[in-house]
Image: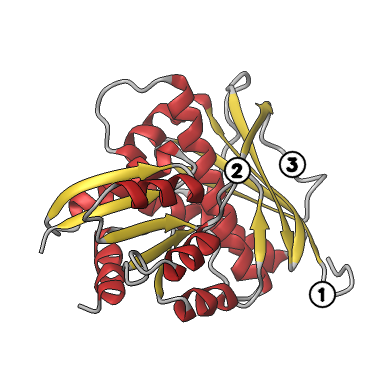
Amino acid sequence: MNEQWQKALGEAVREVFESLCFMMPAPSQGSLSPEPAGVSRLVLAVDFRGAARGSLQLTLPDSMIASVASSMLGEDGPLELSVQYDAACELANIVCGNVLPRIAGERAVFDLASPRVIATRGADFSDVCDASASVLLDEGLVCASLELKLEAAGGER
Amino acid sequence: MSLNVLVVDDSPVMRKMVIRVLGMSGLPIAGVHEACQGREALELLAREQGINLGLFDVNMPVLNGEELVVQIRAQPQTAALPVVMVSTEGSAERIERLKRLGAAFIRKPFGPEALLDAIISATGG
């Protein structure tokens, strides 16, 4: 895995969750413990092309989605599930838009596809991606993974 | 002067977020209109009088934000409309293109202060 991309991914996840959802990293980032089995997680994907092509995936516990949406929209009351999912999709979109310039540079141009909900599954992408990052927030564990191929660099990974 | 704002984004959630942050900016807001893509925004601008600020997403179906600004600048009635482009993806190249079209740019995520700065930049203070 590319360590620089991994660092960029972790920073983007932390910054976006902090500024959009007011969710801060838990103090003990150094010792991420595995979540209990059976924690249901939402997996979101954002495909992109341009200076690089690939896909970003963001997973978060189902239990976190309602508070993410409430924080983003400033709503105290219950939100419809479709609104919660839309908010989570926007969050993934913004993470993607923030990590790509960190990797490909500020002049790189990207087209991001509409974010989509893929599935619910476990959080371990380490065997299938170029970079992954896990950020433990007070509200739960957020994981992001990135598959990316730089077009201008002749397929460098 | 109170602002009569047109918010254009294909995501209802993002429109709501933009309007929320706008409300937190401290600016006097007289009204807010919403459209989900550029074509609808043009129709709304032709129909509604007094819109004096546009907050547009870049990536939208049918007519994207950049194409929308080009069309707005081409119409005498709307050519001088102050516009802030709100986008997830903000390459330097795209920002320069938008500046040449007379639009300010702000990258998501953003807070009230950053939005206020962008609006001041778009309206010329």
Q: Residue B6 location in percent, x, y?
A: 32, 51
Q: Earlier in the sequence, mark 1 or mark 3?
A: 3
Residue at screen point 32% across, 38% down: A73
- Direction front: furthest residue: B76
Q: Tell us which disc is closer to us: 2 or 1.
A: 1
Q: Residue B87 location in percent, x, y?
A: 48, 59
Which quarter of the rendered picture does the N terminus of chain A lie within? bottom right
Q: Which residue is mark 1?
A: A152
Q: Which residue is mark 2?
A: A143
The disc labelled 1 sits on which kind of residue? Ala
| Numbered marks: total | 3
> Marks 1 and 2: in contact by CB < 8 Å?
no
Compared with B54, A61 (above or below) is: above
Q: Residue B83 location in percent, x, y?
A: 36, 66
Instruction: Count neighbours of disc 3 (C-alpha within 10 A) and say few if under 14, some if 14 to 19, many if 20 or more.
Output: some
* Marks 3 and 2, how far apart at CA: 9 Å
Instruction: Count neighbours of disc 1 (C-alpha within 10 A) and say few if under 14, some if 14 to 19, many if 20 or more.
Output: few
Q: Secondary structure at mark 1?
A: loop
Q: Earlier in the sequence, mark 2 or mark 1?
A: 2
Q: Is residue A112 in sight in this rendering? A: yes
Q: Secondary structure at mark 2?
A: strand
The disc labelled 3 sits on which kind of residue? Phe
Q: Residue B125 location in percent, x, y?
A: 20, 78
